[in-house]
Image: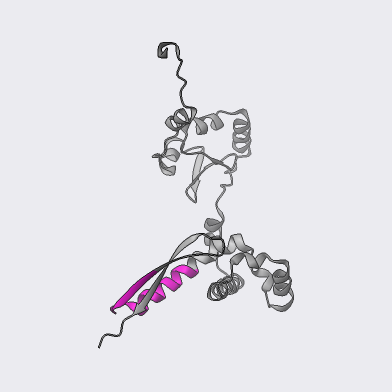
Amino acid sequence: MDAFVVKTRDPKANDKSKCSTKTTVMERHAQFPKETHVAGQKLFCTSCNLVLDHTRKSSVSSHLGSGKHKQKRDLTEKSNQPAKKQRVLTESSSSVPSTIASQERNELCMEWVAMLAAANIPLSKTDHPAVRDFLHKKVVNGGAIPHRKQLQECYLEREYSKRKEEVKLLLKGKAVSIMTDEMSDDNGRWVKSYYHLQCNLI
């Protein structure tokens, strides 16, 4: 009976064979250096400013061979001006020349994130209409504080790194006791907490 059964291939298995997860963004860019660029670990089409799937060479080749891409590429070449390269938010913000206003804005955002973290207040509360209204009306330059997504992408990691270095400096060369505790959060998800205590040895 098995001789008459036609075995079909698993589409997911076939799909995986076409996807090279080991190919890095830079390696794929090296294959198409004139028409792509890399920003924020993403592969962009320079002419179209679109993110391409670097794990699939066929996907990149298909886009570069499309009529829409060729049309945009030809327009760029005729204008005799270099195409504007798309960059990710964090990369763009780090390359902007620092001014007094931007420094004050960064300090305000860092202090805002530090306050929320110390008070155990989620960053998402920044987007609440009442909070936005309060910041605009009662806080000097409060309107400069961005929404949750930008706070998370640009400021939270810096605050975390800053606090981590402070803890490392505080405990450097000292005996430390580490305790762990497993508990669940408000949504019933299991989390593990780590507590670092300085030991005063007699």
What range is drawn magenta here? 159-180
Could you say where residue 51 lies in the image, as x and y percent from the top left? 55, 42
Magenta-span inclusion, residue 194: no
Query: Which corner quadrant of the image does residue 144 belong to?
Result: bottom right
The N terminus sits in image quarter: top left
Could you say where residue 174 lies in the image, as x and y percent from the top left? 29, 79
Q: Residue at x 54, y 72 (%)?
A: 117
Could you say where residue 118 lies in the image, as x and y percent from the top left? 53, 76
Magenta-span inclusion, residue 173: yes
Up-down relation of residue 192 to residue 17 (above or below):
below
Up-down relation of residue 18 to residue 80 (above or below):
above
Drawn side of residue 194 relative to residue 111, left or right:
left
Report the number of numbered marks.
Answer: 0
Q: Residue at x 59, y 31 (%)?
A: 70
Q: Residue at x 41, y 14 (%)?
A: 2
Q: Foreground: 84 or 51?
A: 51
Up-down relation of residue 163 to residue 6 (above or below):
below
Q: From this viewpoint, is residue 171 visible? A: yes
Q: Residue at x 65, y 67 (%)?
A: 126
Drawn side of residue 133 relative to residue 158, left or right:
right
Q: From this viewpoint, is residue 96 visible? A: no
Up-down relation of residue 189 to residue 201 (above or below):
above
